[in-house]
């Protein structure tokens, strides 16, 4: 298996603590680099304190807000998941960012074996699972299932992470599935690819 730790990174937020000047830093999600861009789930940024998530690039903190994204598509309550214009993705330009990762151009095939890679509480994790044929395969979303001992943290923190085969990204983690915690729902990477191509960024 390829090692993608260099290209998948945690997203953080800062919250004022109880003390007068204390600041609490917590991990709220993940994202990943492709050449020239950083990609995550829009809801990770939406839920960050004051909508200001950030990643660490070397010694710098790069702030990720809705208004500095080049693409920002969030899911709202009345969205229809079968609508091909609906997805959960935020894309930021990072000039000079180099990565072997690429976005797939099509939806994955049911039964495909794909690997989920993410940080949780600053610890690297990966899980192998299968694309599943169920009601979660709608529009730009699809389901993926892993074994019960490698499920994503149900309290959150892994959203925005990529689902991979070799260096190809097939999905961006959107949510867990309440009825079965071994299943996660992903926004198709092909949706992000189409948005990037349509804007000629």
Image (spheres, helix red, strand yellow):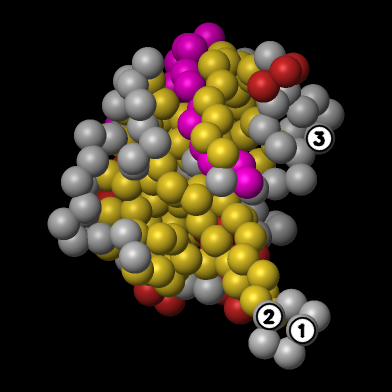
Secondary structure beneath label 1: loop
Reply above or below: 77 against 34.
Answer: below
- Residue stretch rendered in magenta on the structure: 105-121
Q: If the image is split into quadrants, where does the C terminus sit?
A: bottom left
**Magenta segment includes 106:** yes
**C-alpha distance separating marks 2 and 3:** 35 Å
* CB under 8 Å between discs 1 and 2: yes
Q: Measured from the top left, where is residue 196 in percent x and y?
A: 28, 52
Judging by the rendered image, the residue that carries numbered circle 2 is 22
Return the disc, 3 or 1, that comes first in the chain's sequence.
1
Packing grade of label 3 (10 A; few <14, some 14-19, many >=20) is: few
Q: Which mark is residue 95?
A: none
Judging by the rendered image, the residue that carries numbered circle 1 is 19
| Residue lying farthest to the top in this orientation | 111
Task: Residue at 36%, 32% (x, y): give it.
Answer: 4
**C-alpha distance separating marks 1 and 2:** 5 Å
Residue 164 in view, yes or no: yes
Q: Nearer the viewer, residue 80 or 39?
A: 39
| Residue lying farthest to the right in this orientation | 179
Front of the two marks 2 and 3:
2
Task: Residue at 62%, 34% (x, y): give it.
Answer: 185
Return the disc, 2 or 3, that comes first in the chain's sequence.
2
Secondary structure beneath label 2: loop
Q: Nearer the viewer, residue 48 or 201?
A: 48
* CB under 8 Å between discs 2 and 3: no
Task: Residue at 32%, 59% (x, y): give it.
Answer: 58
Packing grade of label 1 (10 A; few <14, some 14-19, many >=20) is: few
Q: Measured from the top left, where is residue 159 in percent x and y?
A: 58, 46
Judging by the rendered image, the residue that carries numbered circle 3 is 178
Q: Measured from the top left, where is residue 130 in percent x and y?
A: 56, 14
Front of the two marks 3 and 1:
1
């Amino acid at each position: 298996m390829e090692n993608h730790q260099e290209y998948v990174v945690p997203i953080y937020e800062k919250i004022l603590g109880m003390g007068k000047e204390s600041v609490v830093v917590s991990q709220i999600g993940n994202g990943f680099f492709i050449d020239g861009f950083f990609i995550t789930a829009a809801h990770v940024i939406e839920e960050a304190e004051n909508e200001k998530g950030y990643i660490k690039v070397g010694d710098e903190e790069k702030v990720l807000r809705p208004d500095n994204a080049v693409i920002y598509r969030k899911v709202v309550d009345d969205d229809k998941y079968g609508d091909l214009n609906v997805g959960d993705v935020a894309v930021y330009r990072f000039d000079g960012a180099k990565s072997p990762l690429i976005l797939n151009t099509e939806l994955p095939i049911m039964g495909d074996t794909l690997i989920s890679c993410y940080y949780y509480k600053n610890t690297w994790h990966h899980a192998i699972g299968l694309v599943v044929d169920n009601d979660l395969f709608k529009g730009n979303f699809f389901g993926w299932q892993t074994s019960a001992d490698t499920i994503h943290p149900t309290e959150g923190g892994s959203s925005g992470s990529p689902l991979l085969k070799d260096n190809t990204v097939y999905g961006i983690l959107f949510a867990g599935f309440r009825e079965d915690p071994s299943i996660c729902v992903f926004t198709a990477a092909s949706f992000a690819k189409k948005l990037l191509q349509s804007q000629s960024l």
